[in-house]
Image: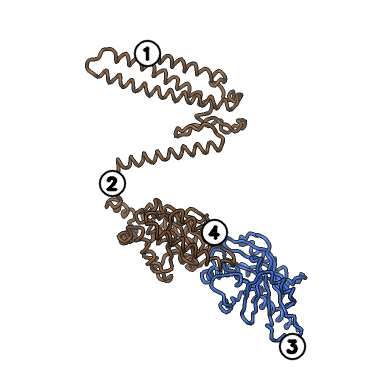
Amino acid sequence: MPLKWVFNWQPNAGSTVNSQILNEVSQCVESMNGVKEGRWKATLTFYKPMLRDQALAAEFPREFIGISLPEQPNKYYFILRGNKIVLEADSSIQLIMEKLQSYKSRVALNFEGFQYQLGDFQLRVGKVVPTHSENLRGIVMEVEYLPISSLEKSKQIVDEFVDIWQEAVSKRSLPGHFMHIEPSFSEYGLADHYTSQHTAVQYAHVMGQLIATVQAVQAGRN
Amino acid sequence: MLQQHQHQHHLQSVVAAAPNPSSSSTTSTTPSSITGEAPPKQVAQAMDRLGQAARLIADIRLGADRLLEALFVAAQPHQSSKPLHLFRQEDESMRQHLQDLRTVGKQLEESGVLNESLRSRSNSWGLHMPLVCPDCAVVAYAWKRQLAGQAGASAVDRTRLALKAFTDQKRRFFPHLNDEEDGESTDNVSKKHRNLPAQADDNQDNLSDCKTLSDLLTNLEKDMPNLKVMTYERLDWLKRASSLPAAANDNTMEAPKHNFHSSHILRAAPQNVVSMDKIAVIELFFPSVFRAVVSLHPAGSTDPDSVAFFSPDEGGSYMHSRGSSVYHVFRQITEHATVALQYFLGIRSKTALHSLLHWICSYQTLFTKVCNKCGRLLAMDRQSALILPPVHRPYRTFSASKVLSTQDQSSNAPEAYHISCFSDDAALALALYCNRLR
């Protein structure tokens, strides 16, 4: 499976994300001869355990995340960031959880937007919105280099592409930049060959960054 | 005289035949009158006329033979006036034949057979006049498929005949060309490339090691630690290509175990059972970088005839030495490799495979080596509007020893260029070379 990097839009201190930035980013992709291909959507859900005795809540991991990815319609991914665990399950697990009433969805977010093809690169630009609202919480971007799947061999290529991309974006003087922090995949027990589990881990980390940003903004306001 | 009767009869038949087509269409005047007739009839007439013409030509040939015979007989010592008589007869009949031929020819020209005037007419129901190709093959109907089929079939035949004739001629007049280890041809090659003496030396050095296919491949595997070389019969390669897992989903984690198992069997069997003289496909696999497929023709020889590059994760029956990858980067490399192959074959076809395989190995740094001109790994190619890594590795100044040093930083490492960086450089190099020549 080809290597994919997930980026998170980091707004500058004092500014927030808005749809104008999203438009500018999309235009930037098109100016690099990107061909719009279609829509994509991923979902991320925070679960909390349904317990009769709330005192036990402390024994459960604080962040239990479930992710669905567009390239794997039959799979569902669970991540425990604190324990560095990632699990790939069948998508019917959501139904099972509901029937068992074991975990309940606390917050659910959608990542959705358009997909572009730039030669051997595939780009996805998407907004982050809570499931039942249009409130833009963030912007994410995926960069994928299709011909090869080795993390080690693709690293340099994707690095340079990102440089080219960042240069193009910075010309538009937007209040912020795309940030990528590579999670340490080996800690999650993942190998050099890229898989959707790697993508799920990246999304969980992006979520962490988004939350941190929002909290920073709120702290700034207070 | 019997012959005269025959001739007259023939003349009569020709004359009788001749008015037939001309009566129904005034062929000597304008071609527009022909279009009053139904196209199938036109085609039939044209075919008739072509038949006539062929018969006339045969008669003329025969007449010429007879003339020569008459001359020969006349040259004999004790002959009467018989040869003279024969001669006169033949002369007459020949002239008549030639006249008839001229008439038929004119008719054919006017009806558009010997030129292409009728082909573009729209009211011809898709039929066109029979076409006489420039190399004298006759194609009766111009229904596209038939035309293509006949032209194709006749082209294949003609090519085969031409090739045979050429090979025969070559063998007769240039016997020394069959033997390429001749000192003469080497001298010519080294004279042409006076400014590249290193290349000739290299080739000479390695030539002694790489006489056979198995030697070549064994040495290659020894020199390149990351490389996996596998050989196949032609049909076995097709099986292998189809069994390769196609890119893109998580199931590739499990699937390779199965496929590896089956392809391992496929791989093991051919090499154990099949001898080197059936090898037709060489696969060069650099894990995580690329897979190259080289075809040998004829099987078991060291003569490569095509090469193609693919992603290490690609799979499918379209993966063969004349196939095309789904990824732009490997398509571009394949194009470049095809040109390089022709270059290696042209320079010195005995070592072409050796050079080609080593040159292919220089691509193991495809995703890590920066361009020698601009110093970057990725660049936007102006022509195709794609962002690509340096897909060009120069082949003109290529020498196998460069590839053996796998350290990217050494000055002897094979160079790499982006498409636009290379063509700029090549143009510059050519200009400098021309200046030096002056």
Residue pointed to by mark 2: B176
Q: Is residue A155 left or right of residue A79?
A: left
Tell me how many marks there are: 4
Q: How far apart, in angstroms, are the residues tagged by discs 1 and 2?
A: 54 Å
The chain shown in blue is which? A
Residue A164 to residue B144: above or below: below
Residue pointed to by mark 1: B2
Residue pointed to by mark 4: B328
Q: How far apart, in angstroms, are the residues tagged by discs 2 and 3?
A: 97 Å
Which residue type does callout 4 highlight? His
Q: Secondary structure at mark 4?
A: helix
Residue B137 to residue B41: above or below: below
Badges 4 and 2, same chain? yes
Which residue type does callout 3 highlight? Ala
Q: Secondary structure at mark 3?
A: helix
Query: Which mark is nearer the camera, 3 or 4?
Result: 3
Q: Is residue B375 left or right of residue B62?
A: right
